[in-house]
Amino acid sequence: SLSSRLQNVFSKLRGKGKVSEEDVSEAMREVRLALLEADVNFKVVKDFIAKVKERAIGLDVSKSFTPGMVVIDIVNKELTELMGGTQSKLAKANKPPTVIMMAGLQGAGKTTTTGKLAKLLQKSNNRPLLIACDIYRPAAIKQLQVLGEQINAPVFSLGDQTSPVEIARAGLQHAKENGNDYVIIDTAGRLHIDEELMEELKQIHQVTKPDEVLLVVDAMTGQDAVNVAQSFHEQLALTGVVLTKLDGDTRGGAALSVKAVTGCPIKFAAMGEKIDSLEPFHPERMASRILGMGDMLSLIEKAQMNIDADKAKEMERKMRTAEFTFDDFLEQMEQVRNLGPLDQIMDMLPGMNKMKGMKDMKVDEKQIGRVEAIVRSMTKEEKQKPELLNHSRRKRVAAGSGTTIVEVNRLIKQFDDMKKMMKQFSSMMGPKGPKGGKK
Ligand code: GDP
Ligand code: MG
């Protein structure tokens, strides 16, 4: 994958005490290939490489104390810029309702995303109305109604005998009369872009004057997704893009090219079929995910929603400053358990996907029990200062926890690796975290 290829390039650089101009050029050649293979638009790749090189030369990377890290940092920043820099928020109408129109090819995920977006809006105390304007696809109306029921959001429909333009107009009126502060219009798609569909979408646009026109794009379609985005943009003046199916085996190209080619920011990312799998798109997080930093920030946000907020904040601070002890490790293990599927969580943690040991360990509940037992067999001091754990102490811990010294050694090694990754992560992001650390 793109991630693992880039990680390979950078692990070569990272190990070097000195980086020559040639090393940087070589790394850039590999980055270029990796991006092209991930189906990133070739013009975008060309610009990207040029920018990274320019910055690297400007900074005189070879003189830096940690040249490998400097190069990674530059690539990270440029990747973030490529995807729009900062998070792009949903527009809001001065006078409600805010009108959001969904557009995209058939099967891209419009209807599903309409439901997900409504759920997100409800979470911040809004009252969205969903309007069923796909009268062509069999059962499309029913699909939206089922989603509406699931989240307890009203769905406006006039069946499949009224024109979509009329439905949109009547639905908007209905929202005004019923005090809905958002309407989300689910529209029809085709397998390919066609004139008739565009004409209909343009008319819906004229009648409802949407504050947002969101193009729903299937991230799995790669380069094609970008072409689709471009032609929709020419016709409809899109205000944003929703990338769906990022949970699948995407090559990542769409995420990296769509903003650069169309100028439209990616506003949301969908990562699953479930109704709560839509998230605001954060370019900086996507960049660090691609570079294998793990999506620590997403994890922290998720933790803050599901776990005690103060504890999560403290954890975030500790991760940033890398003053992380075995006590924190244990606490985190426990909190992680409350978050959901372990494999998914492990993928989000920095370095986890790179730690072969961790993968071999196969994170199951039983394994976590053993890890807990090991940590609990350490003294208070040992938990705070793992470097105290010499051979005889390790033997004692193994005996005390009913495990073996091999397991104890492995855990300590993993803990150290994790700490190292955190240090790297925080130095890359700067002392104030990703936002403060940006240029
Ligand atoms: P539409 O034709 O654009 O309205 O597309 P739908 O909303 O009907 O979605 C088409 C298919 O894609 C459905 O089976 C959805 O469950 C699936 N789908 C939508 N979004 C995602 C996603 O983020 N991840 C995955 N894995 N499947 C998705
Ligand atoms: Mg649909």
Image (cartoon, rainbow, N blue to C red):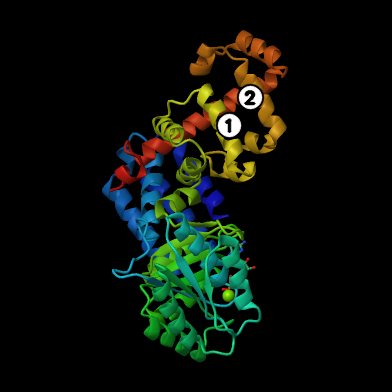
Kind of residue indicated by mark 1: Met
Residue 84 falls in image quadrant = bottom left
Query: Residue 394 location in percent, x, y?
Result: 63, 13
Q: Is residue 2 left or right of residue 208?
A: right
Query: Residue 125 location in percent, x, y?
Result: 42, 56
Please, is residue 118 above or below residue 215 in the view?
above
Between marks 1 and 2, how big is the CA–CA gap? 8 Å
For label 2, the crowd category at 10 Å Cα-Cα, with few meaning under 14, some 14 to 19 and many 20 or more, is some
Image mark for residue 284: none
Q: Which residue is mark 2?
A: 372
Q: Residue furthest front?
A: 177
- Quadrant in which ligand 2 is drawn: bottom right
Image mark for residue 333: 1
Q: Residue at x 31, y 43 (%)?
A: 437
Kind of residue indicated by mark 2: Glu
- Are the residues flagged by discs 1 and 2 in contact, CB closer than 8 Å? yes
Please, is residue 140 above or below residue 248 in the view?
below
Q: Residue at x 60, y 62 (%)?
A: 150
Is residue 105 in view? yes
Query: Residue 18 location in percent, x, y?
Result: 39, 36
Please, is residue 89 above or below residue 377 in the view?
below
Query: In the rendered image, which quarter contains the N terminus?
Result: bottom right
